Amino acid sequence: MKLSDILTSATEPLISCEFFPPKTDKGEANLWKCLHELEAIHPAYISVTYGAGGSTQDRTKRIVCRIKEETGLSPVAHLTCVGANRDDLAALLDEYKHAGIENILALRGDPPEGMDHFEATVGGFEHATDLISFIHEQDGFSIGCATYPEGHPESKGGVADDIRYLKLKQDNGADAAVTQYFFDNDAFFKFYDAATKAGVTIPIIPGIMPITNFEQIVRFSAMCGAIVPAWLHKKMKPVQDNLDAVKKLGIELATKQCCELLDAGVPGLHFYTLNKSESTIAISRNL
Ligand SMILES: Cc1cc2nc3c(=O)[nH]c(=O)nc-3n(C[C@H](O)[C@H](O)[C@H](O)COP(=O)(O)OP(=O)(O)OC[C@H]3O[C@@H](n4cnc5c(N)ncnc54)[C@H](O)[C@@H]3O)c2cc1C
């Protein structure tokens, strides 16, 4: 089912889950186990990332197609501008079309390992806004995009830039936006109000990161620009060496965060599962 139809036909807020394509057979077996466990909470869609530098193109495609063939879940394939020109992208989109894959999350992508800045491929695209227009021209896809309530690390004009480009993503054909994860709901509410004032009308789905390893989250956040607030450091500090206690506290905090977001009327919650099911299932059951 198309993302646009999933969102317009929903009568209550949706839950969606994101996975990355594992590198090993063991990792892949774990992914399928988690996916089957998550079926119990009826995710509206499952999105599969596209590795930095386009490194997982084949694995992303294989997993997305298998989700479509073997489960009752709707897959969304992430696609980036990294390392691909227009012909490469058109060929991949054609393969997706033939496999019945209807949903693409269109991104610029992060620079490949070893590079400190993004460089467009010759004959390719500089920004997600361009990729979205290109996919929109191919017909037959519903398109999602990324957005950043606390600002993308490269945004020179801060959050205002991200709102301007979110509006352009919508104008170029995006049907929905999924946010970078955040821990401070006020930042999301402020961003949402400003985006609405700027004319953004597509659903903006907050990204939720259930914490299972605090050190890892602090490292990730430094790279992707998500803010780890002082209150969260303070709460995690006493338990951060005990992974079970971190997971338990992560579930408790994310449940509270999601309740507040749902009370404010968000259209859905997108869980960054990191290929684990336990916390997402626990949070969703708490809700
Ligand atoms: C929900 C989500 C899923 C993700 N999935 C993946 C994945 O699968 N694979 C992966 O490699 N990465 C993924 N990422 C990370 C993402 O690729 C990086 O954050 C990347 O640096 C920016 O991608 P973007 O699509 O937001 O880029 P863009 O929207 O192109 O933004 C990049 C920068 O350029 C600016 N900008 C945007 N449009 C324009 C324009 N038209 N003109 C000038 N400046 C502009 C923005 O303000 C921003 O600073 C994901 C991020 C999110 C939030």
Image (tube, helix red, strand yellow):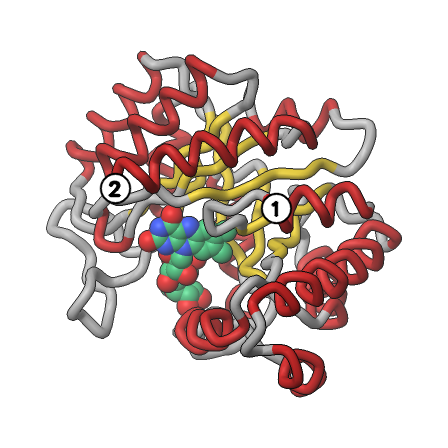
| Left or right, residue 4 beside residue 59 | right
Q: Position of residue 128 (x, y in %)?
A: 38, 50
| Residue that numbered label 2 is attached to | 24
Tell me how far mark 1 sits from mark 2, CA to CA: 21 Å
Q: In which quadrant of the rendered view does residue 224 lie?
A: bottom left
At 44% from the left edge and 70% from the top edge, which residue is drawn?
220
Query: Is the residue 198 above or below the residue 184 in the image?
Result: above
The amino acid pointed to by label 2 is: Thr
Q: Is residue 75 left or right of residue 124?
A: right
Q: Is residue 108 visible?
A: no
Displayed-image quarter of ligand 1: bottom left
Instruction: Give me the disc on residue 162.
Output: none
Q: Secondary structure at mark 2?
A: loop
Compared to residue 193, the image places residue 215 above or below, namely: below
Q: Amino acid at mark 1?
A: Glu
Q: Which mark is residue 278?
A: 1
Q: Residue at x 19, y 64 (%)?
A: 113
Q: Residues within 10 Å of mark 1 (few under 14, many from 20)?
A: some
Horizontal and vertical percent for residue 221? 48, 73
The residue at label 2 has a CB less than 8 Å from ligand 1: no
Crowdedness of circle 2 by 10 Å Cα count: few (<14), some, many (20+)?
few
**179 left or right of 28 in image:** right
Q: Which quadrant is home to the N terminus? A: top right
Q: Secondary structure at mark 1?
A: helix
Q: Which residue occupies the foreground of this view, 83 or 275?
A: 275
Q: Nearer the viewer, residue 48 or 237?
A: 237
